Image (spheres, grey):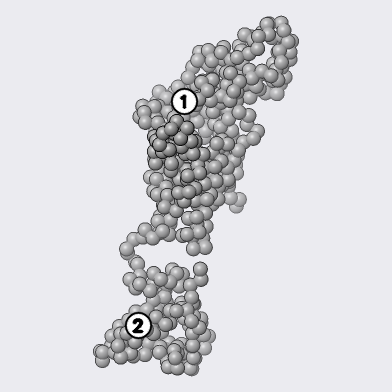
Amino acid sequence: MTTRTRILTGITTTGTPHLGNYAGAIRPAILASEDANADSFYFLADYHALIKCDDPQRIQRSRMEIAATWLAGGLDVNRVTFYRQSDIPEIPELTWLLTCVAAKGLLNRAHAYKASVDKNVENGEDPDAGISMGLYSYPVLMAADILMFNAHKVPVGRDQIQHVEMARDIGQRFNHLFGNGKEFFTMPEALIEESVATLPGLDGRKMSKSYDNTIPLFTSAKDMKDAISRIVTDSRAPGEAKDPDNSHLFTLYQAFATKAQEAQFRGELLEGLGWGEAKNRLFQLLDGQLGEARERYHQLMSRPSDMEDQLQVGAKKARAVAAPFLAELREAVGLRSFVNQAAAPVATKKKAAKAARFVSFREADGSFRFRLLAADGEQLLLSRNFADGKAAGAVTKQLQRGDALDVRAKALGFSVWLDGAAVADSAEYADEASRDAAIEALRAALAPIED
Ligand code: TRP
């Protein structure tokens, strides 16, 4: 069996997806999810959205619009795990475990936080003015998103590379502190799609909401047409040859055209096609490709409870992975049930793998003795009798120090000696091999802890 590559990415739910989001992120992600080797986890990062936005209406609208966009765009929810971050309570829980190992100095270096501080300082304000703990801890929440599902590849924009690196850093630290040799977390890698051109906006700069130069995706054909009519072109008149390679209108066309369509359009521009007509061609192309999806989008938006159902299925799938993993992590950091815990303090000092323990008791004659029990409860040693508890305690302490053991076999049993006196004895074994195995078990149980 080949292990599939787990691809995970989140979409912050502020705003409405535009054509640039679609071409740059949504379309390639949907395509990638169709690969038989891909195990895709795509989610709405709605906890992240709360960091940037305190308008509940907008948060809710955006969550629905983004869910509808992905579904209308052809995401197959039977194939991928598609969910809302806020439906997975294990994520904020893991966030806390990671917060407790994340270095503050690491988070001080996060670009987004630093940019806010710099801006404050520039304006002569307190460096942390208006900065919430949410903004500051943003990378830890994102690390939890990624590490919770042991993602291999994380497709993101360039501005997010640092966050993926921080997830590695934090995950590694957790592994080191609590893994006990085991790697709980897979080290994720940022995946930057070089082949996906960043779409230019109406004015030729990168299409982005912050430049107010976007082409709407699914709102309506009319909105799309209006936006296209506002694409900035040069002033060449109809009949004059156009330069396709210096026209972002052509770049937009290219991003959705087949090679043949592209070649034809290029030829027509060179032959003097008017910009008005060129815009019309672009609209026809986009409408032809996105018209059906637009209809699906509006259907989905008119029946939000259908989307809710699909997202609940996704949450269930995601939690089936997250819940058992989180249980393991809680166990690792010491958040454990009180049931079935060894009571003896010695057991907590030794590593779990060789959690042998001493159990002291008093004989009817008033003398003190102890047993050494292996992790499975089997008795490894029974001590001789000591006059008082202090003497017995001193012996158990000395045995635990990790010094070389003086074990002396006699017949089918053995004794342990300290300072020239036998202090404890084994049981009698059936044969020499069993006896020797028991000596090995004893040495292992009392071996010094390696660190
Ligand atoms: N921070 C990402 C962005 O704004 C969104 C995001 C949240 C994300 N959690 C993630 C992306 C986990 C990838 C993996 O684009």
Which three-letter amino acid code belongs to the residue tagged 1?
A: Thr
Residue 162, image quadrant: top right
Q: Is residue 346 above or below residue 121?
A: below
Q: Is residue 251 above or below residue 405?
A: above
Q: Residue at x 42, y 45 (%)?
A: 91
> Does residue 70 show up?
yes
Q: Is residue 367 above or below residue 169?
A: below
Residue 21, image quadrant: top right
Q: Residue at x 32, y 85 (%)?
A: 390
Question: Residue 349: percent from the left, percent from the top?
Answer: 41, 71
* Residue bearing the label numbered 1: 16
Looking at the image, tell me whether mark 1 or mark 2 is earlier in sequence order.
1
Q: Label 2's element?
A: helix
Q: Which mark is residue 145?
A: none
Question: Residue 446: percent from the left, percent from the top?
Answer: 46, 78
Question: Residue 409: percent from the left, percent from the top?
Answer: 49, 91
Q: CA distance from mark 1 to mark 2?
A: 70 Å
Q: Is residue 289 left or right of residue 315?
A: right
* Residue bearing the label numbered 2: 393
Q: Nearer the viewer, residue 300 or 382?
A: 382
Q: Residue at x 35, y 67 (%)?
A: 341
Mark whose residue sits in front, 1 or 2? 2
Number of numbered tags placed on the structure image? 2
User: Marks 1 and 2: CB-CB under 8 Å?
Assistant: no
> Does residue 372 show up?
no
Question: Residue 356: percent from the left, percent from the top?
Answer: 41, 75
Residue 331, image quadrant: bottom left
Q: Residue at x 52, y 23 (%)?
A: 211
Q: Is residue 268 left or right of residue 445?
A: right
Which three-letter amino acid code belongs to the residue tagged 2?
A: Gly
Q: Residue furthest front?
A: 124
